[in-house]
Image (spheres, grey):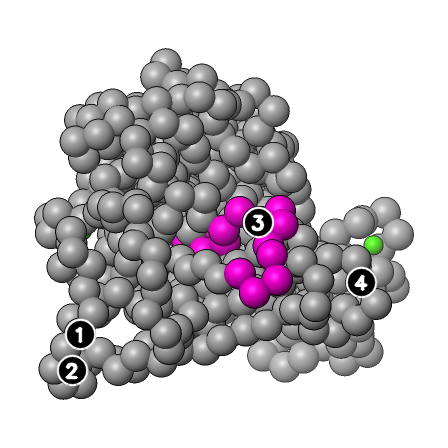
Amino acid sequence: MGTANAENVTVSYEVPPGVTVVSVPDGCVYDATAATITCAPIPNFGRGATTNYNFVFKAPDTPISLTGVARISTTSAEPNTGNNSAAATTTVAIGAPDPNPPTDPNTGLPLIPLIPNPTPNPTPNPTPLIPSVIGTTLQVTPPTNNRNGTETVQFTVTITNTGTQPLRDLQAIIDLVRTFSGVQGFVVVSIDSSDFVINPAFNGTDLQNLLGASNVLNPGATGRITFRVQVTPGFNTGPYFASVTVQGTDPTGTVVSDVSTDGTIADVNGNGTTSDDNTPTIIQFTGLPNIRLVKRMTNAFRNGVIVPGINFNTLINDASDVNDDAPGWANLSPLGLVRIGETGLLQSGDQLEYTVYFLSDGTGNADDFRFCDPTPAGASFLGDTYGAGLGSLLRLEGVETPQTNALDADAGRFIPPLTPAPSPCPSPNNPNGAVYMQIPRVSNRSPNNVGFVRFRVLIQ
Ligand SMILES: [Ca+2]
Ligand SMILES: [Ca+2]
Ligand SMILES: [Ca+2]
Ligand SMILES: [Ca+2]
């Protein structure tokens, strides 16, 4: 660190994966998300001076090699800034025989020194280290779909002091940018608590503290914070994973913290500590469905053979229709004719094949997809085109399946003329009959977001 005093000396420690942080000394804060402990800067650190920090960790039950990295840096203004930071790596083999392991006198837990110090430290540690005494849970409601591209999700944070001492400077922190990485946008619309002073400026982005200053949580007490976020998920409907980090300071100055776990019980596994119950809370948006239909004539038959002179293998972009040239048709071109121009090409007794293409291109799946196509006047539905009693063909998720005309287990049916036809059929009187499909879900994800319904009519 050079020859002069060092200013603003900052110490941080990268916690090894797998361990549970039990406590950190006064002035240091554990960020569970970053798995890093950061201590308050020392304004002026004299040349030749030493200090040490003790962190208490609980090792996993199974043998493991734990590697932690301590870093120290200074912002001193001096010519040679290349020596203003340093790092030290320590590796501890958990489970290896150690005849004389260093332990904390209060907790009996092993101590991991921040910086290996070959000389005995003459200064006794003045701060007794105590186990964590805070626990938190996070619940969310299923998002409310506002049907305008946004969905509102309500979070409830519950914080409990399970220890025997009051916790001051209580805080709860959530990074919504990280939580909702991938959405088009979000905005915090409310934050409330009947137990704590909240931070009304909380926005989840640059202001991530849910609580205001000077909140105290007494031993055995529980408090809640509720906030609502309006999210514009776009096509990334989730799942998303949310966690809140809470912390408080006990009367000795020790900062204790906990990462939330899903649900309402902070110590899910009932082992007396909350630091090993950190299951993220899952948020799944639904998005908005959107369906496009394009109907085309795709073949014509006379006496069992194709009527010559008509090219159905054509892709037509109807200028009056915005649906037939949507980008989602890339996986299934809606080939066929909108109209047959030359009169006399088709005649009474010919069979005309229709194909109604469908595309699901909303931000959410199209659930309970219902399709109705009434038979046009001057024509009659042919009920055995794809086999006896199989009058229509459904292409769904790349598979073409003939559909029975009956109302049964498959998706399709033919509703005979003058039999009442349900929505979305335009006329309940159903004068000429109608092809009807009911599909539980049409995915909005390629390639399963396209398909068609095909059938033939007899020209009268
Ligand atoms: Ca926890
Ligand atoms: Ca536990
Ligand atoms: Ca068009
Ligand atoms: Ca059927």
Disc 4 under 8 Å from ligand 1? The reply is no
Q: Which residue is mark 2?
A: 98
Q: Are marks 4 and 1 in contact (CB under 8 Å)?
A: no
Helix, strand or loop at disc 4? loop
Amino acid beneath label 3:
Ile
Q: Ligand 3 shows up in which quadrant of the image? A: bottom right
Q: How many marks?
A: 4
Task: Point out residue 401 in the picture as x, y percentages from the top left corner.
Answer: 43, 71
Nearer the observer, 405 or 72? 72
Disc 2 under 8 Å from ligand 2? The reply is no
Q: Which residue is mark 4?
A: 78
Give the residues drawn in magenta, as a range.
Answer: 31-49
Amino acid beneath label 2:
Asp
Q: Which residue is mark 1?
A: 101
Residue 67 location, quadrant: bottom left
Q: Which residue is mark 3?
A: 42
> Is 441 in the magenta?
no
Amino acid beneath label 1:
Pro
